Image: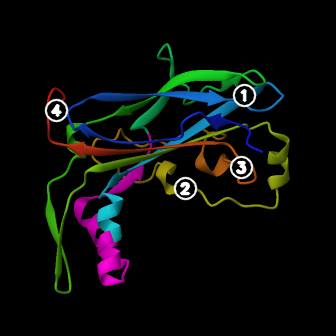
């Protein structure tokens, strides 16, 4: 059974590259009969729209075109471009969220959008095919878990492979802040595989239009 649940767990939309901070309201629920304290991990990937890559894979029956697209546009992932805040604007990225048994917590997922995130259109060739692609999609994954859940102690026999989004060793994608390794206990490798936490995904398609245009 889940230790936490997002009331709505997915959002997809188009926004201007000049919008600045783009916020989504979120409601986090504690569905259990015990008071809980949660931690959050957020990573984002900036690159080519997934449907464009899927089309290339379908046409060529190869994964290589999709990899070529991401490499050509400078697609990469990292942390810090999106953060979770409380209703009053306090970041909870390194602060545990307390929710009583059966209670809820209201907050907002803030995407720090920078104009440099949107890349220029480029051509990628594969055989006789040519694909025109662009770095224009920011995909973000949010994971909320209870570090004190009893099941977590049963993970001694599982070695979690760290996610490289928070390794602190690679250059940040365009528009992302400088990458730093999170403190121990808040890293991707600390998320228990044996626990069903709360998951939220946002997919933002960046456009050239100004925030006022429709």
The secondary structure that dominates the magenta segment is helix
Query: Would you say 34 lies left or right of 214 here?
Result: right
- Is label 3 or label 2 in front? 3
Above or below, comparing residue 194 to residue 31 in the picture: below
User: Quick one: label 4, few (<14), some, or many (20+) residues within 10 Å?
Assistant: few
Residue toward you, 210 or 155: 210
Numbered circle sitting on residue 163: 2
Residue plotted at (67% across, 47% down): 190
- Which badge, 4 or 1, is on the more N-terminal residue? 1
Task: Identify the image quadrant of residue 59.
Answer: bottom left
Numbered circle sitting on residue 37: 1
Residue 69 rendering spot, x and y as whole percentages? 27, 67
Label 3 sits on residue: 192
User: Quick one: label 2, few (<14), some, or many (20+) residues within 10 Å?
Assistant: few
> Secondary structure under badge 1?
strand
Query: Spatial distance from mark 3 to mark 1, Cα to Cα?
Result: 15 Å
> Secondary structure under badge 2?
loop
User: Quick one: label 1, few (<14), some, or many (20+) residues within 10 Å?
Assistant: some
- The verdict on residue 76 being magenta is yes
Observer able to see residue 71: yes
Label 4 sits on residue: 214
- Is label 2 or label 4 in front? 4
Residue 181 rendering spot, x and y as whole percentages? 52, 43
- Which badge, 3 or 1, is on the more N-terminal residue? 1
Residue toward you, 72 or 26: 26
What stretch of residues is rendered in magenta? 55-79
Residue plotted at (56% across, 26% down): 92
Query: Spatial distance from mark 2 to mark 4, Cα to Cα?
Result: 38 Å
């Amino acid at each position: 059974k889940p230790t936490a649940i997002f009331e709505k767990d997915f959002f997809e939309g188009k926004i201007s590259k000049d919008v600045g901070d783009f916020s989504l309201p979120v409601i986090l629920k504690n569905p259990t009969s015990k008071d809980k304290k949660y931690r959050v991990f957020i990573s984002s990937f900036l690159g080519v729209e997934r449907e464009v890559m899927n089309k290339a894979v379908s046409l060529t029956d190869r994964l290589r075109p999709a990899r070529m697209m991401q490499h050509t546009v400078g697609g990469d992932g990292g942390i810090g471009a999106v953060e979770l805040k409380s209703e009053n604007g306090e970041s909870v990225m390194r602060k545990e969220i307390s929710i009583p048994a059966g209670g809820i917590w209201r907050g907002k997922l803030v995407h720090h959008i920078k104009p440099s995130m949107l890349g220029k259109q480029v051509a990628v060739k594969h055989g006789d095919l040519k694909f025109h692609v662009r770095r224009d999609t920011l995909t973000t994954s949010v994971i909320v878990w209870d570090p004190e859940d009893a099941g977590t102690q049963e993970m001694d026999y599982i070695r979690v492979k760290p996610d490289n989004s928070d390794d602190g060793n690679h250059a940040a994608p365009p528009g992302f802040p400088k990458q730093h390794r999170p403190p121990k206990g808040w890293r991707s490798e600390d998320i228990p595989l044996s626990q069903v936490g709360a998951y939220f995904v946002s997919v933002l398609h960046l456009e050239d239009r100004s925030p006022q245009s429709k």
